[in-house]
Structure formats: structure tokens, C-alpha cells
Amino acid sequence: MASAKTGLWTALCGACLILIDGIVVLGTGSFYGWHYSSVSTVGWVEIILSLVMMGLAYYYKRSPAAVGWSILVLAFITMPFDGGFWTVGAWIAVIGGAIIATVKE
């Protein structure tokens, strides 16, 4: 059984991939695959939501379940803005959030 710390690091790795995707989208001005909106919207939404996920990690010790569920929901929200390979980051964050939210310590 995975620990909540493993879930936290998994979620943070996924959030980092989402952040990198947002920066790349804004930097190149293009993206691949189906996306929900324009280049600017996709980039900024990914950057903002990934930073919020990373910021939630600060509150991990106070309420791990709430942090886990919040990361899981935010990762699902980023999925329509991800496309192609970069959806991997959102799925990794979903898995990490689910581990945090459901683990019993």
C-alpha cells in the first residue's frame, strides 16, 4: 500500500508536468491535439491550476484528505486544457491525489 507522502510526491510531479506544458504552450504559441480553448487560455489555465496544486501541498500535514481531493479535482479540471502527451501530467496528479485522499495512516 502506498503512503500519503508517495501520493504527495506523485501529485507534485504531475503538477510540474502540467506547469511545464503551460509554459511550453505560451512560449511556442501552439499546442497539439484537441484543446478546450485558445493558446493563451490553455497556457494560463494550466499554469495557474498547477501552481494552486503545488500551493496546496503546504497544507498537507493539516488535512491530507482535503488536500488529496482538492488536487484530484483540480487535475480533472486541467484535462480539457491538456492535449496529447501532456495529459500524462494530469493523470499522474489524479493518481497522486487519489492516493493522498484514500490512504489511512
Image (spheres, rainbow, N blue to C red):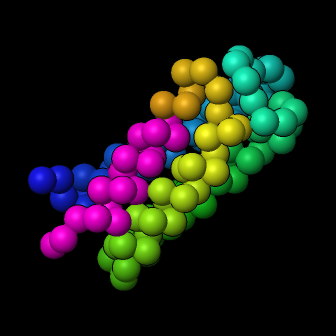
Q: Residue furthest bottom?
A: 62
Q: At which x and y percent is residue 64?
A: 34, 73
Give the vertical position of 32 relative to 103 (above or below).
above
Viewed as shown, does residue 17 lie left or right of 101? right
Give the vertical position of 96 relative to 42 (above or below).
below
In-front residue for pair 31/33 = 33
Queried whether the magenta region covers residue 85, the answer comes back as no
Viewed as shown, does residue 86 lie left or right of 35? left
Q: Residue at x 64, y 51 (%)?
A: 77
Q: At which x and y percent is residue 45?
A: 74, 47
In-front residue for pair 40/87 = 87
Q: Which residues are magenta?
A: 89-105
Viewed as shown, does residue 49 lie left or right of 37? left
Q: At which x and y percent is residue 49?
A: 64, 54
Q: Residue at x 70, y 19 (%)?
A: 33
For residue 27, say whether it is visible: yes
The answer to which quarter of the image holds residue 97 is bottom left
Q: Main secondary structure of the magenta part?
A: helix
Queried whether the magenta region covers residue 93, the answer comes back as yes
Q: Residue at x 37, y 47 (%)?
A: 95
Q: Residue at x 49, y 59 (%)?
A: 71
